Image (cartoon, rainbow, N blue to C red):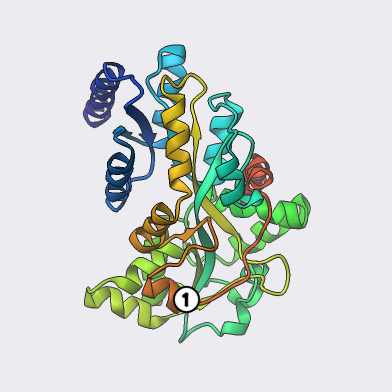
């Protein structure tokens, strides 16, 4: 309780500071991205434009509730978060203003933007397996993870996590709710243990032989690949990687994205920032700094881990459609027992 109170108090103080700085040379960003590498991104924007960035970091739910509570007096100009489902929740709550930008229309692919929010980086939901316990041909699709031959072999994080809900949304879009639920039930039957921990925990469990296979966002694996720690290198050496569904709809892609708050006091600066996020320089930060793929495909990257992972066929379903299926995915995951 004390920790929660302290966190909320800090948020309140930060918002008060923001409110005193609402002018055309200040941009107030509420961010649920907690990556140190993003500091250079913001600093470069200020250097290029002279616009100071005030950033309020917090958990997604906290930030959404704060914007709702603040209402028309909110100092927030932009909300940044990870996962299409979370962005859609904000949009459905009426928090975002329409985005009208020829720059963004040209730079960001149509499947990575909606009328009210855009994705500026992507990450793939790939399959990692223990090379000593699982054959590569057993895990070439997401559906393969529900096959009885993998009984007792699957480690995975909670079915209520947005990363998995977005994957469920893709499954629904490409197949059906009934098939998605059947898949989830088969997956649950194959659990090595109850879902717990994050994606890095799953990778370590697979490498240690606690289970044979997992689903993970690509940047978690790339972090381990770029680590200098011997224990991380040992994890990577034990793992094989499969890009799921290469013969059908492609590997599921999730995103980091942003939208302009409807009541933003600095809308012009906010739009300038979103357009900056689509620039070659900003896009390179996401790849080289946080092991994500740029939303702008033409951007050249310098990341040895992403290069080592190689080329793959990504799913090109629209992020808006993907996000809208997340609630359906939650219900069928609950029925299947993936909690």
Q: Secondary structure at mark 1?
A: helix
Residue placed at 68% from the left, 54% from the top? 317
- Any part of residue 48 in sight: yes
How many dots with numbers?
A: 1
The image quarter in which residue 141 lies: bottom right
Where's residue 156, x and y in %? 49, 61
Where's residue 114, x and y in %? 63, 40
- Mark 1 packing: few (<14 Cα in 10 Å), some, or many (20+)? some
Task: Give 229 or 137, whichever is nearer the viewer.
Answer: 229
**Image: 314 above or below 29:** below
Where's residue 203, x and y in %? 40, 68
Task: Give 114 or 192, whichever is nearer the viewer.
Answer: 114
Residue placed at 43% from the left, 44% from the top? 276
- Any part of residue 210 in sight: no
Task: Give 103 or 97, whichever is nearer the viewer.
Answer: 103
Q: Going by the image, does 183 lie left or right of 263? A: right
Residue on which disc 1 sits = 309
Residue placed at 25% from the left, 75% from the top? 231
Q: Going by the image, does 130 lie left or right of 149? A: left
Question: Could you tell me which quadrant the N terminus lies in?
Answer: top left
């Amino acid at each position: 309780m004390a920790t929660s109170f302290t966190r909320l108090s800090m948020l309140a103080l930060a918002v008060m500071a923001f409110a005193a700085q609402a002018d055309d040379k200040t941009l107030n960003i509420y961010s649920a991205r907690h990556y140190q590498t993003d500091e250079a991104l913001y600093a470069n924007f200020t250097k290029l434009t002279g616009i100071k960035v005030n950033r309020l970091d917090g958990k997604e739910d906290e930030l959404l509730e704060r914007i709702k509570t603040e209402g028309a007096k909110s100092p927030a100009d932009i909300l940044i978060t990870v996962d299409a489902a979370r962005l859609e929740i904000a949009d459905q709550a009426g928090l975002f203003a329409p985005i009208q930008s020829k720059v963004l229309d040209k730079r960001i692919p149509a499947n990575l933007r909606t009328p009210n929010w855009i994705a500026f980086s992507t990450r793939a939901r790939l399959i990692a397996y223990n090379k000593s316990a699982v054959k590569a041909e057993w895990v070439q699709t997401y559906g393969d993870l529900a096959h009885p031959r993998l009984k007792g072999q699957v480690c995975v994080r909670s079915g209520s996590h947005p990363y998995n809900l977005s994957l469920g949304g893709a499954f629904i879009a490409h197949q059906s709710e009934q098939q998605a639920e059947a898949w989830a039930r088969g997956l649950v039957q194959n659990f090595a243990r109850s879902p717990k921990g994050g994606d890095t925990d799953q990778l370590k469990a697979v490498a240690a032989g606690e289970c044979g296979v997992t689903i993970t966002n690509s940047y978690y694996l790339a972090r381990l690949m770029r680590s200098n720690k011997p224990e991380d290198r040992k994890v990577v050496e034990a793992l094989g990687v499969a890009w799921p569904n290469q013969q059908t709809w492609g590997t599921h892609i999730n995103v980091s994205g942003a939208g302009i708050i409807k009541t933003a006091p600095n809308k012009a600066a906010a739009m300038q920032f979103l357009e900056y996020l689509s620039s070659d320089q900003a896009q390179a930060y996401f790849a080289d700094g946080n092991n994500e793929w740029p939303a702008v495909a033409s951007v050249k990257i310098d990341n040895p881990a992403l290069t080592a992972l190689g080329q793959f066929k990504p799913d090109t379903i629209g992020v808006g459609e993907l996000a809208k299926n997340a609630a359906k995915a939650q219900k069928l995951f609950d029925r299947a027992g993936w909690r």
